[in-house]
Amino acid sequence: MDLKNQVDELKRLVEKLKRNDSNVSKEDLMTKYKKPYMELKNEIKKKVDELTDEILIEGLLIVKDERGYKCLEDISQFVEKKKDEGIIRQCSDLIFKKYDVDKVVELAKDVKTGIDKIYSKYLEEVEQ
């Protein structure tokens, strides 16, 4: 599935969540409709993970050698730093409280920019 279709599918699911949150009492969502409600939230989380992974790894080709492993380590450290800065909580709040898929995509693309800088240095080293 291409990026646009992934975003559209996620938006559809988030809109369904928003309707549920708006039209059904929290008590009913946590009792009477708990199973389907939690399944929906889990499906959304899965789709967010797939979408962000797709954005972050797009265009990366890394050789399994010393420089490649160093690049992967640098990328991993960069992503961990972003996690420590609270990006996962931010994304969760955007999806489950503000229902804003576009902002999550924007955040993922911001992280991708940092990854691309690391990757560019790797490519320069490989080309030497």
Image: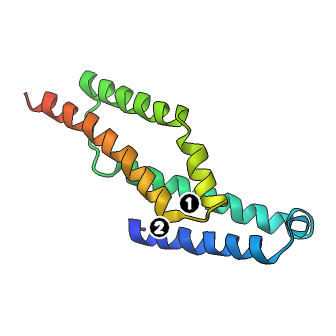
The residue at the far left in this view is: 128
Viewer-closest of 7 and 100: 100
Q: Residue 78 placed where, x, y %?
A: 40, 32
Residue at 63% x, 53% y: name it.
93
Within 10 Å of the Cα at label 1, are there few (<14), some (14-19), or many (20+) other Cα atoms? some
- In this rendering, position of residue 19 left or right of residue 125: right
- In this rendering, position of residue 76 left or right of residue 45: left
- In this rendering, position of residue 75 left or right of residue 10: left
Q: Dividing the picture into quarters, in which one does residue 43 lie? A: bottom right
Quadrant where the image shows the C terminus: top left
Is any atom of residue 26 visible in this view? yes
Q: Residue 2 placed where, x, y %?
A: 39, 67
Viewer-closest of 4 and 20: 20
Numbered circle sitting on residue 6: 2
Colour scheme of the picture: rainbow
Within 10 Å of the Cα at label 2, are there few (<14), some (14-19), or many (20+) other Cα atoms? some
Q: The disc labelled 1 sits on which kind of residue?
A: Lys
Please tell me whether mark 2 sits on a helix, a strand or a loop. helix
In this figure, what is the number of numbered marks? Answer: 2
Q: Is residue 51 above or below residue 64?
A: below
Quadrant where the image shows the N terminus: bottom left
Please tell me whether mark 1 sits on a helix, a strand or a loop. helix
Q: Is residue 43 above or below residue 61?
A: below
Q: Sequence-wise, which precedes: disc 1 or disc 2?
A: 2
